Amino acid sequence: MKGRLRTGICATAIVTAICAPGAYAGGRFDGAWTVVVTTTNGPCNDTYRFSGEIIDGVMHYSGSSLNNFSGRVGPSGSVSVRLSLGSKNAVATGRLTDKAGSGTWHGQAPEGPCAGTWEAERL
């Protein structure tokens, strides 16, 4: 469970994008999405899958228990995410198209740093 929580932080980051302040995607990316997070470096779980929703360019994670969570999708689909849970934190960047997306992430947990990739698909 502890490893799943660490990776969940990174996965959540990917679904909750931040872009340039004031840049909103409107409805282009709105809808339900699923994301697969893969760890390529560090003590986090190898893979984690979760889902969320984008509403008016703002991404919403369907889980709970985050301390700090913020994000948006830019008009061109650019994604940049920040979140934290206690002493754990993560940042993700990448790009969405109308149907899919991908990018990279990195984070810090008490056990050490983690990093990897993510892939998203519109449901």
Image (cartoon, grey):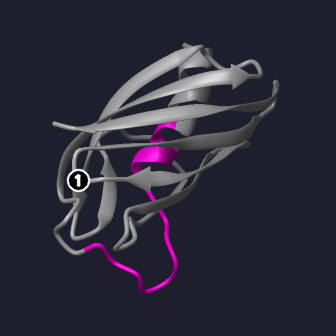
* Highlighted range, magenta: 11-25
Can you say whether 66 is above or below 17 in the image?
Answer: above
For label 1, the residue is 98
In the visual, does 49 lie left or right of 86? left
Instruction: Determine if the magenta segment contains residue 89.
Output: no
Count all numbered tags in the image, as a single digit. Answer: 1
Residue 70 in view here: no
Say which residue appears at 47% left-offset and 59% top-offset: 79
In the visual, does 107 lie left or right of 62? right
Say which residue appears at 15% left-offset and 36% top-offset: 123
Q: Amino acid at mark 1?
A: Asp
Q: Label 1 crowding class (10 Å Cα cut-off): few <14, some 14-19, many 20+?
A: few
Q: Quadrant of the N terminus?
A: top right
Where residue 82 sits, quadrant-wise, is bottom right
What x and y, as percent, mark residue 26?
A: 22, 75
- Dominant SS of magenta comes to loop
What x and y, as percent, mark residue 35?
A: 37, 33
